[in-house]
Amino acid sequence: MQKILILHGLGGSDYPHWQAVLAGDLIKQNYTVSFPSFPKRDNPQLKEWKEFLKKEIEHFKPDTIICHSLANVLWFQTCDELDISLEKLMLVAPVSRTRVVEAAKTFYPYTPPKDLKAKEVIMLASTNDPYMTEEEAMLLKEDLNVEINIMQNAGHINAESGFGSHDFALDWLTKDKNEKGYL
């Protein structure tokens, strides 16, 4: 059974955030899910989050990772240090390389890695995300050499921006099962 690791950003992704709802729905569909809460999630330190992530990956051994917001930067800062090969990686609402969020300043600057350690990668961004412009998202897409879906007026793709659906993630995660007739 596929093992999915869901990584939240600054402040967490508690219900009604789409990541929390997605975790529950995946469990109902018999996926194995880990949705850990990082330490000091309102005032994170990169070093602590990296060590936490490394331990979680070593313990859980995920096939797929779903990152939201600051978790994307965490993945960019950590993946080169990991001996891992993921089936899938979803990067949702990454944050700008140039606008440092004060509460997470230890995560900056960041450089996109050349190898994201996944066979299939998709990035989702929004036309009106306050933490990354559409133009910045397109530049990051080019640097990462990944597919991107730009969502119209989805803000930071979270509950606070009025975006609560997780269908985009569930559809992408289950597409192979659906194509094979499992659902």
Image (cartoon, helix red, strand yellow):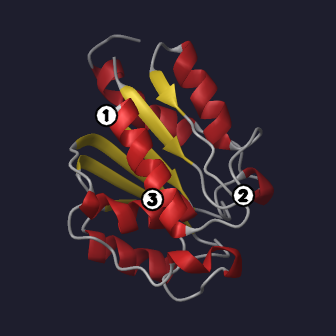
The answer to whether the residues at label 1 and label 2 have Cβ atoms under 8 Å apart is: no
Nearer to us: label 3 or label 2: 3
Kindly identify the residue that appears in the image at 62 percent across and 24 percent down: 24
The answer to whether the residues at label 3 and label 2 have Cβ atoms under 8 Å apart is: no
Nearer to us: label 1 or label 3: 3
Whether residue 107 can be seen here: yes
Kindly identify the residue that appears in the image at 31 percent across and 34 percent down: 63
Q: Which residue is mark 3?
A: 50
Kindly identify the residue that appears in the image at 60 percent across and 80 percent down: 105
The image position of residue 48, as x and y in percent, is 53, 60
Q: Which residue is mark 2?
A: 11
SS for dot 2: loop
Kindly identify the residue that appears in the image at 33 percent across and 33 percent down: 61
SS for dot 3: helix
* Amino acid beneath label 1: Asp
Q: Quadrant of the C terminus?
A: top left
User: Relative to residue 5, is residue 141 drawn left or right?
Assistant: left
SS for dot 1: loop
Q: Which quadrant of the structure image shows residue 167?
A: top right
Q: Which quadrant of the structure image shows residue 151?
A: bottom right
- Location of residue 58 with respect to 90 vertically, above or below: above
Q: Which residue is mark 1?
A: 63
The image position of residue 42, as x and y in percent, is 73, 62
Bin the neighbour count of mark 3 within 10 Å (Cα to Cα): few under 14, some 14-19, many 20 and up: some
User: Relative to residue 140, is residue 130 drawn left or right?
Assistant: right
Label annotation for residue 161: none
Q: Quadrant of the N terminus?
A: top left
